[in-house]
Every structure is written in C-alpha cells, then in structure tokens.
Image: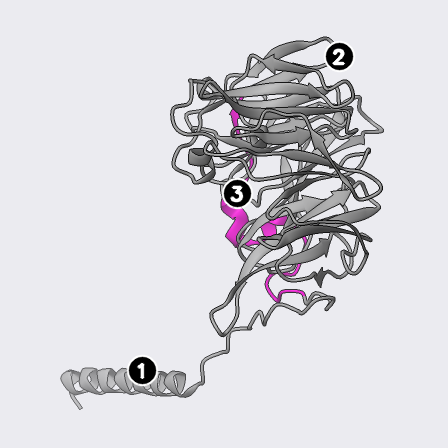
Amino acid sequence: MNRKTLIILGIALILGIVALVLYFSRSTPPEETPSSGSFPVVGEPATQSSTGTAPSFFDDPLDASSRPVEAAPRLVKITDGPVAEGVVALSFNQASSTEKDVRVRYVERASGNLYEYESLRKSIDRLTNQTIPGVAKAAWLSDGSRAYLRYFSVLPSGERNLDSYMLPVEGEGQALARNLSDIVPEGITSVLTLTSNANGSSVTRAGIGGIGGAEIFKTDIGRVFLFSTDRGPFIQTPASATGDSYAFFVARSGLLERVPTPTIGMSFLPSPDGTKALVSHLSSGSLTLTYLDLITKAQTDLPLATMTEKCAWAHDSLTAYCGVPAASPQGTFPDDWYQGVVGFVDQLWSIDFANRVVLFVADLPKLTKAPIDAVSLATDTDQAMLFFVNRNDGSLWSYEL
C-alpha cells in the first residue's frame, strides 16, 4: 500500500467520524427553556425565578453593564439601565467609622428585582430573585423592607391591565387587587390603596400586605392622585394648562376639605408632617413654584420654575430638594412634560424653610454631558446623599450633599 493510498484512507476515516458526531448531535432533543409562568392571582405567594442562584448583583451577567460610575466629584451614575420610578434612601451608622453608610433601594425595570446601592463601597447587591418584567413604578415602606410594584399585564384575550405586586426583601410576595390606581405606604405600618376612575374614587387603608382593609373615604370626583402625611391623606385632581386642578385634605370623618391653591396647571406635594406643601402652577402663563403653609394658608412664590413631580421633601419637613430646568422651559406645561413632548436639563436646588432661603446644590449640565431630567428624588434621614432618576433614560444617580 503506497503513501497516497494511506492518505486517502486517513481522510475517509476522519470524514466518517465527523458524520457520526453530526448525526448523534442532531438526534439529541433540544433542552427546554424554563418558563417563568404566569403572574399569580390576588393573594397568591410569589414563585422565585429560576434565573440566578445568589443574591449578588454581579453574579447576574445581564446586570454587569450597570456598575456604578463616578461621573464627577460627588456625583455617581449608579445604573446604566432603567429603574422603576420610586426609590427609598436609608442611613446606617458605621461602628468603625464616622462616615455615614447611605444606601438606596430601587427596582430594576426590566426584571422587577429589588437592588441596593451602598454609597461607601460604591457597590450594588441584588436583594430578591423574583421576575416581574416591565415594572414602571414602585412605592416603598419607609424602612425599605418591601416595595409595591406597578406593571401592565396582557391577558390571553388581549385585555391590558394595571397590576400591583407586594415584594418584600425577605419572605414571599403576593399579587394585590387588579387595576388599583395607586398604592401609597404610610410609614411602616400600613398602606393606602386608591381606586379612581370616571365613576369616582375611593381609598382603603390596609396592612402592609396590601390585602383587605377598610374604606376611609369615597367621592364622586373621578381620577385623583393620592398623598400620605402624618396628618392624614391628601388628594389632587389631574393638572393641565387647559383647566383647573384642585387639592383636598381627607379629614378623619372622611369629608374632603378644599386646600386653597392656585388652580391652573396646579400640582401638589405635601410635606411628610402635613403642615406645608409645594405647589407648581401657571402664573401669567409661566411655570411657578409656590410654598403653601397648610396651617396658616399663607402662600409664597419661590424663585424656582419647576414642577412638584421633580421635588422631594426631606424627612424633617424643613427642607425640600428639586430638579430645576437650567434654562427657562418652553412649551405648554405641565401637559407637554407629562406627555413626553419636552424634557428638561436640570440643576439641583434645595429650599430651607426654617431659614427661608433657596440654595444652589449642583450644576448637573456642567458635571455630566448626559442631560438629566430629575424625578423620583429622595434623601436619607441625615440628608447626606440625594438620589434621583433621570427621566430621559431611567438611570439612577446619587449626589453627595
């Protein structure tokens, strides 16, 4: 047998082996992809997602791109991807350091998982392993122990519903009533659930599980927004430049007491103790921010042209922080901003009500090239850090005060 024949036989043998490998690989059935299942019905406990095994942010390759980045001194871009509107800031004392360990808890919009960013380590940890995709908004108990998630689901019939889900950091979650208009926590002891449509509105107070409870008031006013304070709840009708908007205090009797505010384009934000409010409205066609003393009814216009949706009160009800457009906004407000027709490029300002001064905090346009339209502002109890979400892309940021 000559050399040429040996080479031919060798090639034939290799081709035969390759053919056998291909045959058996194609004969093996494909591995099934685990299904996440359907969302549970009201009161049904959560089922953990099969994705991921450890509660660590960096163990999940889908989130690896969202590592915190120091965009400028004192300014950190915590996430690259979008988070749900609604965060909670927490302060912890460090036994071995005089520095405050400030953390923020938030919900990743895509997965519905709860995460925590720690400012000292500049690190992120995943707190839950529950998949609820497309979470738009979240409301938190003040201690950050659980979140109430809002998301849309589509039934097999094609019907689209607004669903709510209570998700604790520890333990099982559960689905809440379908098509609730809002869920507003009251500290760490209870939550208010709002049902509001064209036929009227009602509010129920329930335990932190969000199920059951007792109705505290009902009104024929359709479509309202709900706020919780130490004094009691407030409600507000939708704001528009083309009509009047009103705010009401819900008395213990369940009766509504009108709050004396401007009405055109009016949006309302009461302080945690219920004694003060920020009111944004149109004055001579221009966006105006007004301070309202809810006890004396005195009103003072502030030198800041912004909306209450871009503000947050500190826990002591003596300070508020706002994202304020760096340039005079052009458009029909608040309608154009609500509809996403226009966005803002914000600076950060604070309002000191004890000393009656407005203070400049940070010039965000100079600190970062990313245009930031700040919403979901929150600060810890010591006011060491200010957190906010960029409405333009949903990213979460922090600024050291």
Quarter of the image with the N terminus is: bottom left
Of circles 2 and 3, the one toward us is 2
Task: Report helix, strand or loop for mark 1.
Answer: helix
Res 66 label: 3
Mark 1 vs mark 2, CA separation in Å: 81 Å
Task: Report helix, strand or loop for mark 2.
Answer: loop
Count residues near mark 1 (Cα–Cα under 10 Å), then give few for <14, some for 14-19, many for 20+: few
Residue labelled with disc 1: 18
What residue is rendered at 64% in x and 24% in y?
A: 278
Asked whether residue 14 appears in the rendered view, the answer is yes
Q: Which comes sooner in the sequence, label 1 or label 2?
A: 1
Q: Is residue 92 left or right of residue 16?
A: right
Residues drawn in magenta: 48-72
As drawn, 345 above or below 192: above
Q: Position of residue 124 (x, y in %)?
A: 63, 42
Colour setup of the view: one colour
Residue labelled with disc 2: 354
- Name the residue type under label 3: Ser
Q: Tell whether label 3 touches label 2 (CB within 8 Å).
A: no
Count residues near mark 2 (Cα–Cα under 10 Å), then give few for <14, some for 14-19, many for 20+: few
Q: Position of residue 112 (x, y in %)?
A: 60, 54
Residue 56 magenta-drawn?
yes
Asked whether residue 378 appears in the rendered view, the answer is no
Count residues near mark 3 (Cα–Cα under 10 Å), then give few for <14, some for 14-19, many for 20+: some
Task: Write down the quadrant of residue 251 in the picture.
Answer: top right
